[in-house]
Amino acid sequence: MNLGDDLLTMVVLNLEGEIGGSMVLTFNEENAKQLAASLLQMEPNNGPDWNELEQSALMETGNILGCAYVNAITRLIDHELLPSPPYFVRDYGASVVQQALVAQAAARDTVLICRTCFHNEDEELNWWLLFVPSIALRTAMENALHTPE
């Protein structure tokens, strides 16, 4: 996965509070337009601009995926997490992910980023959900996964 070379369409959700983080649903332009068209039951918009309905369809997809992810993490760490409303952005993926990783990189020598890939039957789609926890959330997840010897 190369995030830096192409302009990507993304839906971003931030987890509010001290135990937070970011979730970034990334698409290449073609896959984003195809998903929006499929959700809206219309032909793909081949123009460079996005209308509000197309953006809303992608943001709702990000919201549904993000909430499912947040609910699973909430159960893991036994601490309620609150996702922000999703927002739509078109930017270079490396730039967005770099902003999400700054806090982890400043506090530790290693960073944690989780990537979920999506497939349609046997075909890998060109979209991913990236999860970047804050240091506090990363620590809570590590503690929850640690089993006493």
Image (tube, grey):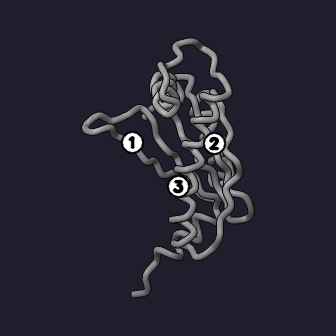
Name the quarter where the C terminus is drawn. Answer: bottom left
User: What residue do we see at 60% from left, 40% from top?
Assistant: 97
Q: Vertically, is 18 above or below 93?
A: below
Q: Vertically, is 14 above or below 146?
A: above
Tell me the tag on residue 118.
1
Residue indicated by mark 3: 112
Tag 3: residue type? Leu
Tag 2: residue type? Val
User: What residue do we see at 52% from left, 46% from top?
Assistant: 130
Q: Position of residue 118 (x, y in %)?
A: 39, 42
User: What residue do we see at 57% from left, 36% from top?
Assistant: 58
Packing grade of label 2 (10 A; few <14, some 14-19, many >=20) is many
Q: Vertically, is 45 above or below 77?
A: above
- SS category of the residue bearing label 2: strand
| Residue sitting at the far front | 41
Judge from the rendering whether residue 54 lies leftward or rightward of residue 146; answer left or right: right
Tag 2 near tag 3, CB within 8 Å: no
Residue indicated by mark 2: 12
Q: Position of residue 146 (x, y in %)?
A: 46, 77
- SS category of the residue bearing label 1: strand
The one nearer the camera, 35 or 76, is: 35
Residue 28 seen in this snapshot: no
Tag 1: residue type? Phe
Q: Vertically, is 79 above or below 30?
A: below
